[in-house]
Image: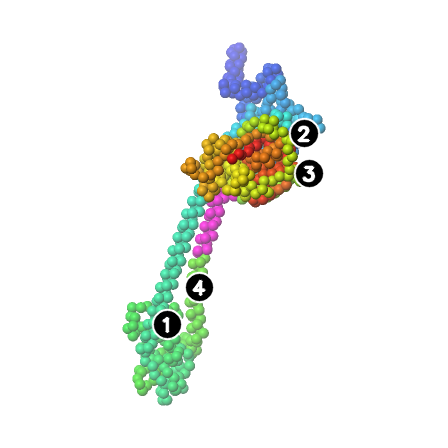
């Protein structure tokens, strides 16, 4: 029985410890980073027992929308301490349990054990070799095979100031790592591309200094195409509805105003005609109007005097002519009984007399009818008319002119209030439209419509780039310009689209140049009027086309021709082996111009459109400038010889690393760029070796608002920014 129980326990234990092929592969991958000489039973046992933990590799992430990004500023230096490359990106994300502080140090990767490097840092024997006198260093590890916490603790055991963990997939950006229990070690995840860039320089035994600083709070979402279309369509629809409503409203207002004006004019004409038909008479001695107890005129509240002219209305009411005529012109009704004289005289029987004051008085008359006394008398040539004016109920006081005016003012106030309400509705609708549009934009841009993150990135980048100005005289100055609102990646994607091709090294002896002829210490093709105005490529990545066309324009003047602005768009659209605004190679473009015999036409015939279009073909006999030949060489280490060729051949087309040029404002560029990552095409128009720091004069294609009126200056002699690695000249 005991034997059976033991057997069952063993079966139960075996079932619990059975692993799937996928799980076994995880164990093997866990151990693959360890050199085979160090593998032993305890290692395998430890790996197997931690399988369930390892199976959840790097999935301990915080599933929250909000996170804190990290700005990675890296400077690559060679063995002599010269700066070869500068990287500045907001590509990092602080871990959930990481201190959110700034940290600086050199990058160190795991050391090799028996020729094997465990970049994931998961092998139990992972170690780091720290150079002497190194106080601050940052570990660079790859995501995968084990948990974030294990990676961070291994680096912390060697006193790392921080750990950068780069992603193992280019499809995913970064995640917020969960790594509770790692203490005060700063942990940041970076993108795969940035991690591999840093690893590339470390493997070349170059020193990589990295500064990690606090960035912006996420999520950071750019305005994608779908969001842009949504916002645009919503805005257009909103504006169409608003415009249609406002147009309809104002048309209706204009129509009402015109109708009211026409009605008033018709009433005025009819009133004049009616007044002319009314009977008038002059008060004579003995008429009842002259008696002391006779009632006064109901309009002016004054008694009748001898020789007063009175007007007799169809209702037999009598008033002073000078008092009642203006009233009739305006109101068309009797002041006493509200009889419409136009209807009574048959002039406009169907016309309504629209008079607000008359209606108000009529309502008041009906309300106080018990207090009104009207004396009607027959009118003849021998008798006069006696009228008892309108009075208030319970009082003998007559209605004064001020009370009538108050009635009119009250009605006018009602009209003004109505107009004010209408305008209030219009204003409210406009404000609501604007607020709705703002809400849609904010929603479409992921609550990050402002450029706060880009501006902060720009400021930190400029501080970093200007940090060497204390050590180097005449150093470049970096500040705010038209590109400061762009992130480094956006700037690269838009403007740095040139490709460098491998070219042969220049050998003076093979080209008949031995450097014996004297050359000027300072030279500039602008002084010979051979260089045209600075262009602006704008959002098209056609720097390679601008540089080639500019060189052709200048060489034409050098050879004795007149300056002619040639078509850049023709090269963008037609150049072989190019992608138009998405990039191209100056060397390939010159080869295409030579082999095809394509003539560059005038800019006015083929104007620049800032986009890639369909190539337009001109007849073979059409005028233009053709390229007879070209030369392309590597002048690295021979910049003095390169300056001589500039004088002999004309402006030179070069490819440079322009990542740090985003914030350039002037001065001589002496650092912050490398020779390995060429990405931008420019032309060199001259040089100056008379000062303390010799420099090249470089014409860019980013407009005159950039740099020194569109120009930059690069230190000569050290292949700064790779200026001498790929140099091309044009021959016509």
CA gap, disc 4 and disc 3 = 78 Å
Q: Secondary structure at mark 3?
A: loop
Name the front one of labels 3 and 1: 3
| Pointers 3 and 2 in contact (C-beta within 8 Å) | no
Q: Which residue shows up at 62% across the image and 21% down it?
A: 112
Give 622 or 347, whichever is nearer the viewer.
622
| Pointers 2 and 4 in contact (C-beta within 8 Å) | no
Q: Which residues are magenta?
A: 425-449
Residue 284: quarter of image: bottom left
Lower position in the chain sequence, tag 3 or tag 1:
1
| Pointers 3 and 1 in contact (C-beta within 8 Å) | no
Name the front one of labels 2 and 1: 2
Q: Which residue shows up at 54% across the image and 40% down it?
A: 560
User: Residue 303: image x %, image y %?
Assistant: 41, 83
CA gap, disc 2 and disc 4 = 83 Å
The residue pinned by badge 3 equals: 692
CA gap, disc 4 and disc 1 = 21 Å
Lower position in the chain sequence, tag 3 or tag 2:
2
Please say if 639 is above or below 290: above
The residue pinned by badge 1 equals: 331
Residue 309: quarter of image: bottom left
Q: Residue furthest bottom?
A: 286
User: Residue 149: image x %, image y %?
Assistant: 60, 28
Q: How many marks?
A: 4
Q: Secondary structure at mark 1?
A: helix
The residue pinned by badge 2 equals: 80
Please say if 383 is above or below 462: below
Crowding at mark 3 (Cα within 10 Å: few <14, some 14-19, many 20+): few
Give 648 or 239, whichever is nearer the viewer.
648
Whether residue 187 appears in magenta in the rendering, the answer is no
């Amino acid at each position: 029985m005991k034997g059976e129980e033991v057997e069952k326990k063993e079966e139960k234990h075996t079932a619990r410890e059975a692993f799937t092929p996928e799980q076994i592969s995880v164990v093997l991958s866990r151990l693959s980073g360890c050199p085979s000489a160090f593998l032993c039973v305890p290692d395998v046992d430890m790996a197997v027992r931690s399988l369930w933990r390892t199976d959840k590799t790097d999935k301990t992430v915080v599933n929250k929308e909000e996170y804190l990004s990290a700005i990675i500023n890296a400077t690559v230096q060679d063995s002599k301490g010269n700066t070869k490359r500068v990287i500045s990106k907001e590509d990092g994300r602080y871990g959930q349990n990481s201190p959110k502080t700034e940290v600086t140090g050199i990058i160190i990767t795991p050391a090799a054990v028996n020729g094997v490097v465990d970049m994931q840092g998961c092998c139990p024997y992972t170690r780091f070799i720290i150079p002497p006198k190194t106080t601050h260093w940052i570990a660079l590890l790859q995501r995968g095979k084990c948990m974030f916490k294990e990676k961070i603790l291994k680096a912390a055991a060697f006193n790392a100031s921080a750990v950068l963990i780069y992603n193992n997939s280019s499809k995913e950006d970064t995640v917020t790592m969960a790594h509770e229990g790692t203490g005060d070690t700063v942990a940041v995840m970076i993108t795969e591309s940035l991690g591999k860039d840093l690893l590339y320089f470390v493997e070349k035994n170059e020193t990589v200094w990295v500064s990690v600083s606090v960035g912006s709070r996420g999520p950071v979402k750019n305005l994608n195409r779908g969001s842009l279309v949504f916002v645009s369509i919503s805005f257009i629809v909103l504006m169409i509805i608003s415009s249609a409503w406002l147009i309809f409203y104002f048309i209706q207002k204009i129509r009402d105003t015109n109708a009211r004006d026409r009605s008033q004019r018709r009433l005025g004409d009819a009133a004049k005609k009616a007044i002319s038909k009314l009977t008038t008479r002059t008060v004579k001695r003995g008429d009842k109007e002259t008696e002391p107890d006779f009632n006064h005129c109901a309009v002016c509240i004054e008694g009748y005097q001898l020789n007063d002219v009175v007007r007799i209305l169809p209702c037999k009411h009598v008033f002073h002519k000078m008092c009642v005529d203006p009233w009739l012109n305006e109101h068309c009704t009797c002041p006493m009984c509200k009889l419409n004289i136009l209807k009574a005289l048959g002039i406009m029987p169907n016309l309504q007399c629209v008079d607000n004051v008359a209606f108000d008085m009529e309502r008041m008359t009906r309300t106080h009818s018990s207090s009104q006394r009207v004396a009607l008398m027959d009118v003849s040539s021998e008798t006069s008319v006696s009228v008892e004016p309108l009075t208030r109920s319970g009082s003998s006081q007559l209605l004064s002119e001020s009370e009538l005016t108050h009635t009119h003012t009250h009605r006018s106030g009602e009209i003004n209030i109505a107009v004010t309400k209408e305008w209030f509705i219009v204003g409210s609708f406009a404000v609501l439209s604007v607020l709705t549009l703002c809400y849609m934009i904010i929603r479409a841009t992921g609550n990050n419509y402002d450029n706060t993150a880009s501006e902060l990135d720009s400021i930190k980048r400029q501080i970093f780039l200007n940090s060497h100005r204390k050590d180097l005289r005449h150093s470049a100055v970096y500040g705010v310009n038209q590109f400061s609102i762009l992130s480094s990646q956006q700037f690269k994607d838009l403007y740095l689209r040139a490709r460098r091709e491998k070219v042969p090294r220049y050998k003076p002896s093979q080209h008949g140049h031995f450097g014996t002829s004297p050359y000027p210490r300072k030279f500039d093709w602008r002084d010979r009027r051979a260089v045209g105005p600075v262009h602006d490529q704008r959002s098209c990545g056609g720097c390679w086309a601008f540089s080639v066309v500019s060189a052709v324009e200048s060489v034409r003047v050098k050879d004795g021709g007149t300056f002619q602005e040639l078509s850049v768009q023709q090269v963008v659209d037609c150049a072989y082996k190019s992608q138009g605004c998405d990039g191209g190679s100056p060397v390939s473009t010159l080869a295409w111009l030579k082999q095809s015999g394509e003539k560059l036409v005038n800019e006015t015939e083929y104007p620049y459109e800032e986009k890639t279009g369909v190539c337009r073909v001109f007849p073979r006999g059409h005028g233009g400038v053709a390229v007879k030949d070209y030369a392309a060489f590597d002048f690295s280490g021979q910049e003095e010889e390169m300056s001589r060729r500039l004088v002999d051949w004309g402006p030179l087309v070069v490819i440079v690393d322009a990542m740090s040029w985003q914030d350039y404002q002037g001065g001589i560029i002496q650092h912050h760029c490398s020779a390995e990552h060429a990405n931008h095409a420019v032309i060199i128009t001259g040089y100056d070796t008379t000062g303390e720091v010799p420099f090249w004069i470089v014409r860019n294609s980013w407009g005159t608002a950039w740099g020194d009126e569109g120009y930059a200056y690069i230190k000569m002699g050290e292949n700064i920014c790779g200026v001498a690695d790929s140099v091309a000249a044009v021959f016509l």
